[in-house]
Image (cartoon, rainbow, N blue to C red):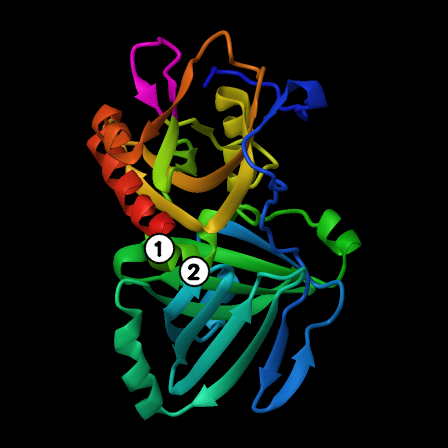
Amino acid sequence: MAKSKKITPVIVPESEIEEIEPEISVLEESAAVPVVKGIQGGWKKKPDGVIRRKFLLISAPRQMALARGVEIEQGYVVRERGRELRVRRESTRYYLSARDRSGPGVVGQEIRITKGQFDKLWPFTQGQRITRLRHVMKLDRFRMKVDEFTGEHAPLRLAEVFFPNAEASKGFKKPDFLGEEVTRREEYQTAEMAIHGAPEPSGMCQLGILPYIFKDRRLHLLLVTSSSGNRWILPKGRQEPDMNPHEVAIMEAVEEAGVLGTLRQDLRIRCQMADGRYLQLYAMKISKLLKSWPEMNVRRRRLFPLSDALEIIGDPGVAKAVRRLAVAINK
């Protein structure tokens, strides 16, 4: 990826598109709408217009000393195709929650369970857990919750501020104890951190795409050459302002490889590259290859059978992540 890129929409004439298979390109994405929760058999909709904004916490605010912390441990039993089933303990209260992000909105239901039921389900969350100490307090006229993560996610601290409407959010002046805003950063979602661990510092993580297609019932991967032309790699780039990670991955697929397709947000993996940086890799089923694309004069592209691609990818960490994603794709 070039050091400096101007982010502009990519407009592709129909004449420049080569059909791979008759499939509409779809980005499976959840809209940011209120969650519907079922509380002990009933349903309660969160107030319309409530806006949440999440920030890194640089230092503890004064009011945090007065807010009693509640210990929370949460684990995911199932998380795939935009749906998740999780169990959570808040102090001495236990919950089972289901959430569906596969439709136009986010719908969920939560019920209280007993400690015994929680203990029976908890082993199924192995490898997909997160623990934190939560403090709820006031920030001026707004509600704020602060999560201090423990265990393998320490010393991460996040603050979430709740606004009644867009006007209040727009007029918010961030106090000094709040750092970078990470509201749109997927890697800071609780489920993402439970599975992949705490995010790396800004600039330490790249976003990439694994374009794939089945030919003669065999999985093939599309690779591109590096800017120097001497290595076969996956399209990837850095996080861009005002873009979600999966949006960046899609942009890199078009710019570096001339690929359109279906991106599955539940088919992704994070790995550490040989240079010490991290790569969050999304799988994309190819539907179209563009006849011309922004970096066609800089890079070559080619489809390789899975076994050949794994041999060609020179980074052991990336190759291992690709192998794991391939197992999920083949299911």
The answer to whether any part of residue 57 appears in the image is no
Q: Is residue 312 above or below residue 226?
A: below
Q: Is residue 214 above or below residue 175?
A: above
Q: Amino acid at mark 2?
A: Ala
State the residue in front, 206 or 169. 206
Query: Can residue 226 be found in the magenta stretch?
Result: yes
Would you say 241 lies left or right of 44 here?
left
The residue depicted at 53 percent of the width and 46 percent of the height is 182
Q: Is residue 200 magenta?
A: no
Badge 2, how many Cα within 10 Å: few under 14, some, many 20+? many
Tell me, for residue 331, which label it has, or none: 1
* Region in magenta: 223-233
**Residue found at x 26% / y 26%:** 313
Q: Can I make out residue 21 in this image?
A: yes
The amino acid pointed to by label 1 is: Lys
Instruction: Give coordinates of residue 156: x percent, y percent.
Output: 37, 53
Image coordinates for residue 261, horizontal then vertical, percent: 55, 37
In terms of depth relative to the viewer, which is nearer, 304 or 71? 304
Classify mark 1: helix, strand or loop. loop
| Residue linked to disc 2 | 191
